[in-house]
Amino acid sequence: MDSRYSQATAAQYLDRYARRHGEDLALRVYTSRLLGQEPSLVLSGGGNTSVKSRVTELLGDETDVLYVKGSGWDLASIEPEGFPACRLAHLRRCVERASMTDEQMVRELRGHMLDPASPTPSVEALLHAYLPAKYVDHTHADAVLALVDQRSSAALVDEVFGDGALLVPYVMPGFVLARRVAELWAQRVAEGREPTMMVLDKHGLFTWGHTAQESYERMIDAVTRAERHVERRRTTPRASWPSADRSLAATLAPALRGALTRQSGRALIATFRDTPSLRALCHRDDLHDVATRGPITPDHVLRTKRAPLILPRIDDADREAVRATIERALSEYASRYTASFERCKAARHVERTMLDPFPRVVLVPGLGAFAVGRTRREADVVGELYEHTAAVIDDAEAIGTYEPTTELDLFDVEYWSLEQAKLGKPTAELPLSGKVALVTGGAGGIGLATARALLAAGAHVVVTDRDHARVADATKALEVRFPGRALGLGCDARSDAEVAHAMREAALWFGGLDVVVSNAGAAIQGELHEDAGHAALAESLEINLLAHQTVARHAVAVFLTQRTGGALLFNASKSAFNQGPGFGPYAVAKAALLALMRQYAVDLGAHGVRANAVNADRIRTALFGAGVAEARAHARGLHVDQYFRANLLDRETTADDVARAFVYLATAEATTGCVITVDGGNAAAFPR
Ligand SMILES: [Zn+2]
């Protein structure tokens, strides 16, 4: 691993931050980001860094402080505000105590910050304070974990890092670790062997230096040594497997997501990953054995749980059999988790409330992994952690025997009040949190407004449109406001193959589907008694009826696999009730679309699948482009603006009005076979 430290970039950081925050902190921010941006060093908020400095307080006192990473900040993007300043002398006195509870430690840390508005200092703040060096860096580097997650880690650490490294046997992070290090350190100093770096068994490593560059480059040097050792000692080359059958993964996803949702009682996102390290892990003959030993560093237990769910090998194409297999594997997992919780609780003589007993990682032998979360972003964090887990397990097994920390130690971390706090308070659930919706014709008009409204209601949304470029642009804009929750796909709803592909992508990306807004349509005019009108009818039936049927049919296949109900929502039109002159091709198809909706309601109610429609009128969208608005207004003897306001409320109806109706129907658990009218009121078109 090469150092990415550059004097030029360091100078930019000094320019940007030094005047307000001082040079020490400016460079602390720089090298913290260098560490955070390298996933093989730290992942997703892991690791922590600090710098000792001196500040002048408001009343003129000169105070020695420890700037240490605050919780809730990610090293990759940390700002000076992410480093609370704590009174160094007080923190060092804390380490001298024989014991301290976690709650006492947090109170001491928070109570001795210079700015009470700062984030809570890292749980490792006392350890950072204790270490004498100015800059201190802590990571969970993959290569080092491959050495310390070993039965013979002590010998390996000695061999790779030599006598300068202090190996700290595994203890809980926090006060206990700081105390343990203080004892070992004093011993080494008494022997005249002050450590030059520190390796935490089953956990990670610390380096330090007089400057930010020195501490960072010592980290890179240590990790490079570990990487070289692993490369030299590997007895087998890294296995390389071709990408497996993604369509099989797409079939499994809704069955898995459905089982998870039903057993856990909450809608979850499951996303498929088959990166090289995950593929290699899932092809191992000893997958069960190695993957259930524990996470590569204790922190991960909060995101990935102690072990993944490993599905049995699935060759059966029978949907029922696959579902039953997944269902059983999942409930067995939950029983194992519960038993482990009870066992550890009894062994530790503590009272704890059990967290949910369901997996965050699901491995499919020969195929790849599903990562599970309340959101796609949460699932991505899990997936990324597990990708590195797979790589470390592979390296560790190639040079020895993978042996991470014990079940009991992991219980302490998983049920540690301070770690629980890291996960944050559960965010308020929105009506469609954890749900997945798909909108056709989503690049503009009603489709785009509906996609936006569904996202605002908490859903993950697959936005499809036959215009690939427009849907890509539209999704990019949605992604800015709703990160990780919008997926844009080019898809012509008239094409069976393209719709099937969109459903597969929804399954791989989010795990399945709960709501479909079948919106794509075209306002096709013509006189039915003329040849041109006859041709127009055929064209209209294809887009305004059969395309909806194609979308509904594929969506229902997913719904029935998930067995968690589902909502089919159609964009009908007032033309279904009140036809305009010369608009036969459109009106006939839309009337048939209502019949289609009602048929689905009748046929699938027993499966909890609801079918409903929104009957909107005169929404200013692309449908009314190319002279259609003018023609329709003319047919009614009105100007265009009059045409759009010609309703009982004398109010133009917007795409957002329609979108709200779709969101309502997506959540209306007791409503099926219903049409909601959104048109400002039109007595002649009252449904009857
Ligand atoms: Zn750590």
Image (cartoon, rainbow, N blue to C red):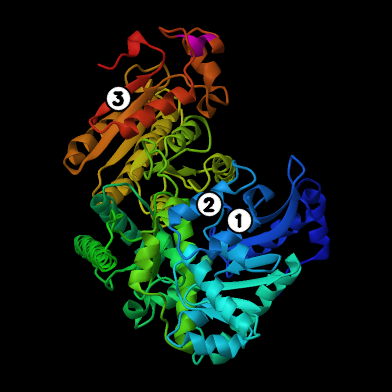
- Write the residue at 34% across / 83% down: 285
Find disc 2 in the rendering and name its residue: 108
Q: Which circle, 3 or 2, is nearer the viewer?
A: 2
Find disc 1 in the rendering and name its residue: 90
Which residue type does callout 3 highlight? Answer: Val
Q: In 3D space, how far apart are the residues under numbered discs 3 and 2 (Cα atoms)?
A: 61 Å
Which residue type does callout 2 highlight? Answer: Glu
Residue 675 - label: 3
Q: In 3D space, how far apart are the residues under numbered discs 1 and 3 (Cα atoms)?
A: 68 Å
For residue 10, what is the image quadrant? bottom right
Which residue type does callout 1 highlight? Answer: His
SS at circle 3: strand
Discs 2, 1 touching: Cβ within 8 Å? yes
Picture layout, residue 159 above or below residue 182: below
Which range is magenta? 642-646
Residue 270 locus on image (x, y percent): 38, 56
Task: Please tell me how crowded label 3 is: few (under 14), some (14-19), or many (20+) other residues with Cα within 10 Å.
Answer: many
SS at circle 1: helix
Residue 635 locus on image (x, y percent): 48, 12
Picture layout, residue 445 above or below residue 354: above
Magenta stretch containing residue 672, yes or no? no
